Image: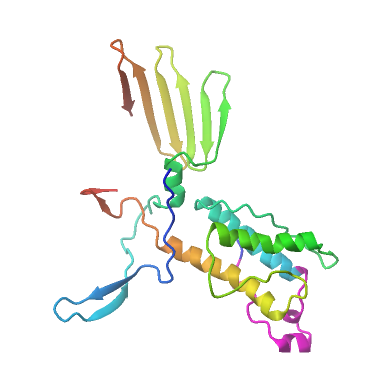
Amino acid sequence: MFDFNSLILDRTEADVARGTAKGFYNATDLNRVEGAVLELNNILFDAGYPIGVQAKTDWLRTSLPTEEQMIRYLANIQLLQRRFYKGKSVVLPSSMQWLGIIGANDIEKIVKELEEVRQGMVANYVYCGTFDCGGEIV
Amino acid sequence: MKDFIDRLSTKPNRYKLTEEGTGKVSYAKVERADVPTREGTPLNRAAFLALQGMEGSTTVFNANGSIGETSTTGKTVTEFLADGSIRETFTGVSGMVVRKTTSFQADGSIREVIS
């Protein structure tokens, strides 16, 4: 099960300047986001929202992402937005080319928000046997 | 087909309380605390779409003439009995079983019995 608390939302210019792990975008970032996307895809399918993402979760340090793969990477998130929920506060980067810290944070903020909205949806579920319908318990 | 979509709230289970008379408004989070031994089936998009047949399944035609349909909610086996009746047995993932037997009467009517 994916830990959505592991998503990185707070990269700063200082991370880039100091060369900390958060200052780079590499295989661990790709695997984290793709893992979260795949988890959402699977959970939402069971909830009646077939998303149909195609995720790759085995990126290596030596992997060389192609432009096509990076288009798919962002398209997965667009699919989640289109087929489940699209928030208004954060905008998905249009491309992974020249991705900055804001764009990198925004990608993971969107994924985190999707999970939070999903959790809220589940918390609102009504279950059989918990309310009356025409005088009889449903 | 009816498209059932789930409510997406920013504050789940939050209710507004308005005092009669004073009109004073307050908000409260209300959740069931009945300690269920079984939670029950969520009445959500997945459930309502499944009721309308929008549910993935795999169908197999068995050597004995019966038909098996397996989905995420359980398995239905349809058997064609020697007396001309049809018996459908659904076994849910919970293990609960419900059976419907359809028989064709001499007067042309159809009888369905749930057991």
Question: Quarter of the image containing the N terminus of chain B?
Answer: top left
In the displayed structure, does residue A2 sit left or right of residue A84?
A: right
Residue extending farthest to the front is: A94
Residue A29 image-quadrant placement: bottom right
Q: Can see residue A4?
A: no
- Give A109 or B33, whichever is nearer the viewer: A109
The magenta span reads: A3-27
Q: Position of residue A129 (x, y in %)?
A: 31, 51
Q: Position of residue A111 (x, y in %)?
A: 60, 68
- Give B67 or B51, whichever is nearer the viewer: B51
Residue B15 image-quadrant placement: bottom left
Q: Can see residue B75?
A: yes
Question: Quarter of the image containing the C terminus of chain B?
Answer: top left
In the displayed structure, does residue A137 sit left or right of residue A74?
A: left
Q: Position of residue A26 (x, y in %)?
A: 78, 72
Residue at the spot x=42%, y=41% of the render? B51
Residue at the spot x=46%, y=21% of the render? B79
